[in-house]
Image (cartoon, coloured by chain):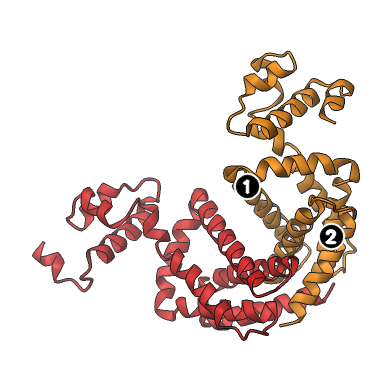
Chain colours: A red, B orange
Amino acid sequence: MLDLMVRWEPGTRSRLQAAAMDLFVRHGFEQTTAAEIAAEVGLSERTFFRHFVDKREVLFDGQHLLEEAFLDGVAAAEPDASPMRTIESALDAAAAFFSDERRSWSVLRQTIIDANPPLQERELLKLAGVARVMASALRDRGVPADAAALAAESGLTVFGVAFQAWVSPGETRSFRAVVHDVLATLGAVVADA
Amino acid sequence: MLDLMVRWEPGTRSRLQAAAMDLFVRHGFEQTTAAEIAAEVGLSERTFFRHFVDKREVLFDGQHLLEEAFLDGVAAAEPDASPMRTIESALDAAAAFFSDERRSWSVLRQTIIDANPPLQERELLKLAGVARVMASALRDRGVPADAAALAAESGLTVFGVAFQAWVSPGETRSFRAVVHDVLATLGAVVADA
């Protein structure tokens, strides 16, 4: 116990999270129990559940922060910014969330999610929820409903494509740079109709 | 309308479907059992399950036809068509599926789905699956992965926004006309960045 306490990760939550990710990758998400995660760092299952509602929360606990970042980005856009410029501001705010230091965590998380269809569904539904919230924020800024939905969902499409690229092997661009490249590709694809 | 369908539709499957929709709207999807649906048209629960895997299939049995229509539309596009033009062809093929005769069924179905979050999730996941299949079809035509994903997902975004408009009260445009209006709005929204 003393040995564990002097390790570089001081927080119990962080230690549980690191152990969980390790087990998810090695044994699979379904096959890993909360008790096993806790045991890995010398703690009880009860302690695990004081920090996380369930083992899924290890992977999804940052989602509300991401949603907040998107909405902060919408709020930060100039009042007369076009819907797509407003979405670009939201994507820039989200990009601040995905720093280069975070990339290896995101790659690990994506590996776990890619191996588990129910987690993929959960991720998809979460992002669809963010799109709905952003469309609503655009409507509050006076954007007509159709344009708001199209801009918000295009923004989440760009986010998804950029994220996949950002966690790909060998990718070195910052998340923000990838987002702007994908935005440019979207512009070219939609214009060439 | 439903009464007429029951009287004039000779097929057992159609009678079960009409009875199911009627009960879903009146009592809610969760509250309706397969036995109640069958009883409504004087049949046994066993007969219901010979026609449908579960009561959800009443609402979702057309989905594979829709997916096929999308893919037929991709295949029908000129070999050198741009990704977005190819998606437009897919949307036109899907539009043939949503004839004016089908609109009242679609409105009813949407009413049931709007009242039930798990059905909304299922719908969303189904459409995400169609987007994946379309992106794959575009890659098979030589479209780079990012452009393929962006065009396919934009296509499904347009489909979703167009569908919501098409089933709205008072909407009289054909599905195809709505799709083209939404495509034009997407072009304008994305260009104004």
The image shows a total of numbered marks equal to 2
Chain of residue at mark 2: B
Amino acid type of disc 1?
Gln
Amino acid type of disc 2?
Val
Residue A157: x %, y % from top left: 64, 67
Q: Name the residue under label 1.
A: B120
Q: Name the residue under label 2.
A: B179
- Tell which of A72 and B144 is nearer to you: A72
Residue A30: x %, y % from top left: 40, 46
Calculate the distance from the C-alpha at mark 1 to the C-alpha at mark 2: 21 Å
User: Local crowd at mark 2 within 10 Å, few (<14), some, or many (≥20)?
Assistant: many
Residue B69: x %, y % from top left: 82, 48
- Tell which of B140 and B92 is nearer to you: B92
Chain of residue at mark 1: B
Q: Residue at the spot x=75%, y=59% of the render?
A: B161
User: Local crowd at mark 1 within 10 Å, few (<14), some, or many (≥20)?
Assistant: some
Residue A141: x %, y % from top left: 65, 75
In this picture, residue A117 sits left or right of residue A82: left
Which quarter of the picture shows residue A73? bottom right
User: Under tag 2, what secondary structure?
Assistant: helix
Q: Residue at the spot x=80%, y=26% of the render?
A: B14
Q: In this rendering, does residue A130 appear at all?
A: yes
